[in-house]
Amino acid sequence: MSSVFRVDAGDAALLTDLYQLTMLQAYWHEGMEEEAVFSLFFRTLPEHRNFVLACGLDDVLHHLETLHFDEGALAYLASLGSFSDAFLAWLADLRFSGDVHAVAEGTPLFPQEPLLEVTAPIAQAQLVETAIMNQIHLQSVIASKAARVVAAARGRTVVEFGMRRAQGSDAALKGARACYVAGVAATSDLLAGRVYGIPVVGTMAHSYIEAHDDERDAFRAFAELYPDTVLLVDTYDTREGVRRVIELARELGPAFRVRAIRLDSGDLGALARDARAQLDAAGLEQVRILASGGLDEHAVAALMAAAAPIDVFAVGTRMAASSDAPDLDLAYKLTAYAGSGRLKTSPGKAIWPGPKQVFRLEEQGRAVRDRVARHGEQGPGRPLLEPVMRGGVRLDAGRVPLEQVRARAASELECLPGRLRALEPADPPYPVEISDALREHRDRVVRRVADGDAGR
């Protein structure tokens, strides 16, 4: 096996927990192959979040489309000594043949609302739990964080510079996509640019300046090679660095095309005001100011409140790792098997049985409340869950171009009440109701479980 592993490799089916495979063998051994419904949802909002922006469905559907165990994966499972040859032979032919209903990427969601539901023979639906949670969790967490940063910037450009401190290469790639869905304009990640077509941006590192004996020489050489560049001015003395950019403009005359300067340390607001005054006095009103260095939504909001003349916010670690809220209480639970509702009643972890639908009620273009209902229920509001895969094959609703996903996210976020788009906790929180029919169904299933006949 190669020392380099990619999630799309032939043995990607092993991107799962051991107990998924031991349960699969138990299902197979017992002849349990009826259809199951699993629901993916989160129980609570992370602290300081008013919604979660659904993201990652495209990767989930790709995983389901390509799911198979290659010879190397089967050989590894055989080496564990826990799986019979007959089961491994059955596993070799396993492909996902189920259906998926999902909320469109870029949709804000709230606790207890399914992001997606998988309907498939129980072994198939069980196996994919880990990979589904992994992809949806990462991208939804980061998209939710990025949406806050974009909101704080109030129309100013936000770019993503977080790859080097993201949690691994897959997280960097998928995180860049999630940020773009949430409204971030560009990324420094070249692979994300190639894979997804996201605009890529970059400036220069302090090391380039330091490697030259004179800051002026560094600026001149870089601007000659890349006329439309961004020059980093805070390696030594920021005010002096701005003056040297102005000197370069005078030296180059009409050939000067530097687009922006970058501030990466210190009091960004004060430095931006000083830099703006210097540039304007020199007739360089067209030169923009880009700020970076430890930014998050709160820092961006503070700079905006102080009227700092910053045109572009480059946000890295705190957005790429969602530092203040890096995890989501996400769950993927069995809600039906063999035509019968299933549930947990554990304290704090109870679930709603059966396949479901979420209706969003809107008034004058604003979302006012959601209702979680049984699948097939009718009622007011816009249904959010739609079929995206049938029989293991994507439908058109599961093949949405990234630009369309991004546009939908912007539209859906705009439809939220203002208090939900604010950085502070919403008061009151967004209301989510449970339909009477779903409550009654849960009560019936609870009574069956209490009677010791969950499958009746």
Image: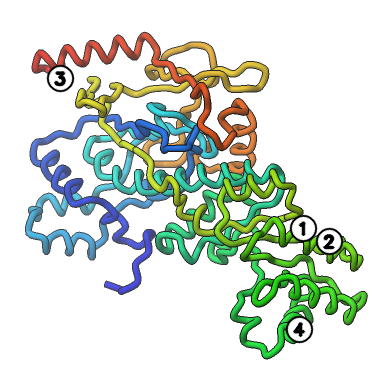
Label 1 or label 3, whichever lies nearer to me, is 1
Residue 184 % position (x, y): 62, 50
Residue at image position (19%, 34%) is 33
- In the displayed structure, does residue 24 sit left or right of residue 291? left
Q: Nearer the viewer, mark 2 or mark 4?
A: 2
- Which residue bears the numbered disc 1? 273
Give the image location of residue 367, x and y in percent.
Answer: 58, 22
Residue 117 in view here: no
Identify the amino acid type marked 2: Ala
How far is mark 4 from mark 3, CA to CA? 77 Å
Label 4 crowd bin: few (<14), some (14–19), many (20+), radius 10 Å:
some
Corner quadrant of residue 316: bottom right
In the picture of the structure, the residue carrying the numbered disc 2 is 277
Q: Which mark is residue 216?
A: 4
Q: CA distance from mark 4 to mark 1?
A: 22 Å
- Secondary structure of the residue carrying numbered label 1: helix
Query: Circle 3 sits on which residue?
Result: 454
